[in-house]
Every structure is written in structure tokens, then in C-alpha cells.
Image (tube, rainbow, N blue to C red):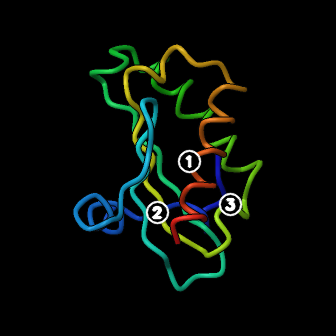
Amino acid sequence: MLPKNQRLTSNRIEYLLKRGKKNGDNFLTIKYLPNNKERNRFCVIVSSKIFPKAVDRNLLRRRLYEIFRLHPKMPITPSDMVVIARISATKLKFQELNQTIIHILQNLISNS
């Protein structure tokens, strides 16, 4: 689990889903906006349509949170991010998810 200062509030999540910039690939979508905080803040959304069982949803969610915990300084400018998992993400192992997140975050840095 991420520390409280790296988690998003529900109001900010709704705002990001409506107005955030979008980037992603076949496995994950990231909606993001820069923030005026000193660190990145994250939220992971895994729909029950992707995994009907909560055990499976929580496993994917925990893996994604662990990847963000391991890479706290990506991207360089502090941002708020909502990560939305797609159905194809269910087949990925931890290392493949890690590479996917790093690739998407590097694209965010290069597009900024």
C-alpha cells in the first residue's frame, strides 16, 4: 500500500477522469495532470468487468501499486495519476507490468 501522501482523494480522481490528459497502451490507460505537490500521487482502478472476483482484482491492484512504490520519481514533474487496467493486463506477469508502466511513464516524460 502506498503512503497516504501518495494516494489520491475521491474528488481528485473524479476530476482526473473528466479532465486529465490520457496516455497508455493495450494493457493500461493513465489519466494524469501535474500537481503542485512535491511528489506523485496515484490511484489504480481495476473494473469488476475485467476480474469478476475481488481476489483477482486486488492482486492486479497490489502489483500496480508495488510498481509505483518502486519507481517514486517517475515522471520527473510531480503529477496526479489514475491508472485504469484493461482486460489484456490480466495476462501480464509482474515484470511485464513493470516494463509496461515504465514505457508509458517514459512516454509521458517525452511528451511533456
Q: Earlier in the sequence, mark 2 or mark 3?
A: 2
Q: Position of residue 72 (x, y in %)?
A: 72, 59
Q: Which of the two discs, 3 and 1, sits closer to the camera?
A: 1
Instruction: Report the residue at 63% width, 55% height from top.
Output: 106
Marker disc for residue 74: 3
- Secondary structure, mark 3, is loop
Q: Position of residue 83 (x, y in %)?
A: 45, 46
Q: Is residue 50 above or below residue 102?
A: above
Instruction: Report the residue at 62% width, 30% height from top.
Output: 97
Q: CA distance from mark 3 to mark 1?
A: 10 Å
Q: CA distance from mark 2 to mark 3?
A: 16 Å
**Amino acid type for the residue under numbered disc 1:** Ile
Instruction: Report the residue at 42% width, 30% height from top.
Output: 26
Q: Residue furthest bottom?
A: 36
Mark 1 lies on residue: 104
Q: Which of the two discs, 1 and 2, sits closer to the camera?
A: 1
**Amino acid type for the residue under numbered disc 3:** Met
Mark 2 lies on residue: 8
Q: Earlier in the sequence, mark 1 or mark 2?
A: 2
Task: Identify the image quadrant of the N terminus.
Answer: top right
**Amino acid type for the residue under numbered disc 2:** Leu
Residue 30 or 58: which is nearer the viewer? 30
**Where on the picture, by quarter, is residue 77?**
bottom right
